[in-house]
Image (cartoon, rainbow, N blue to C red):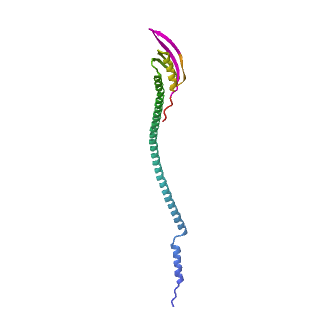
Amino acid sequence: MIRINLLAVERERTKRRAGGGISLAQRVTIVCSLILVLTGLFLGWWWWSLRQQSVRLDADVVAAEQEIARLRTVLAQVQKFETQRAQLRQRVELIEELRGGQNGPVHMLDEISKSLPDRLWLTQLSEDKGVLTIEGRTTVLTALSDFVASLESSGYFKRPVEIVGSNVDSQQGSELVRFTVKAEFVPPAPPAR
């Protein structure tokens, strides 16, 4: 009978596997090397992404500064227009105020002219702080009293309208009465808008 030692063959296979493979120290070195390479790659990628983000943010800052410069010029123009608008508004208000103030003298002269009776002439009209001094001449004293009554009834003059003085002058056979009247003008209410 032939005997074959099968155990010896198996011992050689296990020895080959153990001796021909990679040792534990080499495995650790390979794993550590892989970890270092992967870490290096990760750090490189991270640095590259941060660099790209930095470049993008720098471009955004430059664009924002340009926009700020453009908006400053627009803001300066807007402020200029606002000051012009305020000036124009003041002018319009002044014109409206002057228009409103024109009604007073117009009404005053209109009421005085409506109140003038026949044979009465005005020679001078002056105003000081709303008080009118009217000087004139008439041929009849009743015309003077009619003038004063007409001014009082107009509603534009505060009562009483007083006759300050009157003098009779004789000239070439006719008599003229010189008079002075004081009245306080009450301006009409401004028209409703």
Q: In front here: 12 or 161?
A: 161
Q: Position of residue 44 (x, y in %)?
A: 48, 57
Which image quadrant is residue 88 in? top left
Outermost top residue: 172
Viewer-nearest residue: 55 or 20: 55
The magenta stretch spans residue 138: no
Q: How many labels does the image show?
A: 0
Rendered position, 148 above or below 20? above
Q: Where is residue 93 in the image (x, y as percent from the top left)?
A: 48, 32
Majority secondary structure of the magenta segment? strand
Percent x, y for residue 75? Answer: 46, 40
**From what the image shows, is residue 7 above or below residue 114?**
below
Question: What residue sits 49% from the left and 53% below the top?
Answer: 50
Indicate yes or no whether the magenta region holds residue 167: yes
Question: From what the image shows, is residue 175 above or below residue 62?
Answer: above
In front of the other: 79 or 140:
140
Q: Residue furthest bottom?
A: 1
Front-lying residue, 57 or 153: 153
Q: Position of residue 178 (x, y in %)?
A: 49, 14
- State the extent of the magenta-drawn residues as a range: 165-187
